[in-house]
Image (cartoon, rainbow, N blue to C red):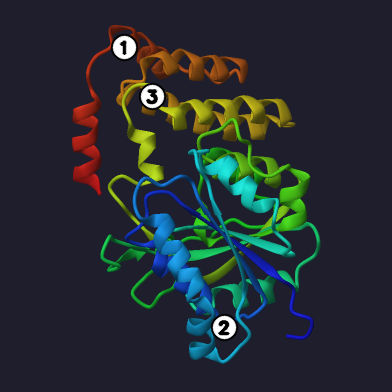
Amino acid sequence: MKNQPLVTVICLCYKHEKYVRQALTSVFEQTYPAIQLIVVDDASPDESAKIIKQTLDNQSQIYQTTFSLTPIETSFLSLSTNQGNCKAFNLGLAQAKGKYVIDLAADDLLLPYCIEKQVVTFEKLEESYAVVFSDLYYINENGSQLKTHFQRDDKGNLLIAVPQGNIYEQILAKSFISAPSMMIRKKVLDELNGYDEMLSYEDYDFWVRSARKYNYFFINDLLVKKRILKNSHGQAFYLKKNNQHLISTLKVHQKAMIQNQTIQENLALAISVRYHLRLSFFTENFELVPQFAHVLAKLDKLKWIDRFIISLSTLKIPVAKLYQFYLFATN
């Protein structure tokens, strides 16, 4: 590929001393050479920062030994106080030079051909496309493969059609994309002023804001390995009491309601609102139940079952342990 566009990989790390070296090495081992790597350690209390520095100091030798190419450009932001995912990413984004950006968690891995395939795809698309995304493997703490994100048959064929193009309604209703599989056009991130720093997590809000105006393209390939950890950032959705992810989701719903334009979009949004209303009840975040219900009422989608759950939430029935057992039994 002539005049290869620069890709910026922003690797966010928080308490990932066991995995960050592997994540960074997966960037060094890409078949695509035009990469800027920005590593942001969000004041990890473990040895993450030390390991990152050691790995970056050795990266030139590792990269040249593997591919005999010029070392990629790297930088390291070691934050003295924890800023949270959204702000930490934005600090890295402020230094990004690439045409495209990847948000890489320090416990995930890019397969060697990931960036090359994403760039080749992106360069064929019109400017109306903000994101390319793919399928990925889920792996456990030890790196063993568990399953793919999208269901496939024994021959590797997809069992369902993955939405692409204008996905606004679909992404309102359900977060069907796995964020680590995305490559993002940087000008879109700049237009949106990066991630919303008032939120505890980034992906749903980014999808809703970007999909309102831009298209998404699905690459039917497995390009990433996402690690499933017991105490991962995503598991915070199931925390009892003062659940910041649920609070952030409520804010995203409120913002989406303002930018919706059709009855169908309101119906799609109501699906997500109703799910999170119930999740608030099952995780004993009872104070959030009437707030999600208020959004449903404004969408004119409040059903009798929603009112029933609202009534139950006022009793503050301790159902979290039973819900956790249900999740364990069905996964």
Which residue in the structure is indicated by mark 3?
280
Please tell me in which quadrant of the rendered image residue 34 appears: bottom right
Task: Give the quadrant of the N terminus.
Answer: bottom right
Residue visible at 50% across and 72% down in the picture: 57
- Tag 2: amino acid: Thr
Which residue in the structure is indicated by mark 1?
312
- Compare marks 3 and 2 and give the one earlier in the sequence: 2
* Residue 189 badge: none
Residue visible at 54% across and 80% down in the picture: 60
* 242 relative to 113 in the view: left or right: left
Disc 2 secondary structure class: loop
Mark 1 crowd level (few <14, some 14–19, many ≥20, 10 Å Cα): some
Spatial CA distance of label 1 from label 3 is 12 Å
- Tag 3: amino acid: Ser
Residue visible at 37% across and 28% down in the picture: 279
Please tell me in which quadrant of the rendered image residue 117 appears: bottom right
Disc 1 secondary structure class: helix
Of 54 and 116, which appears nearest the observer?
Answer: 54
* Residue 31 badge: 2
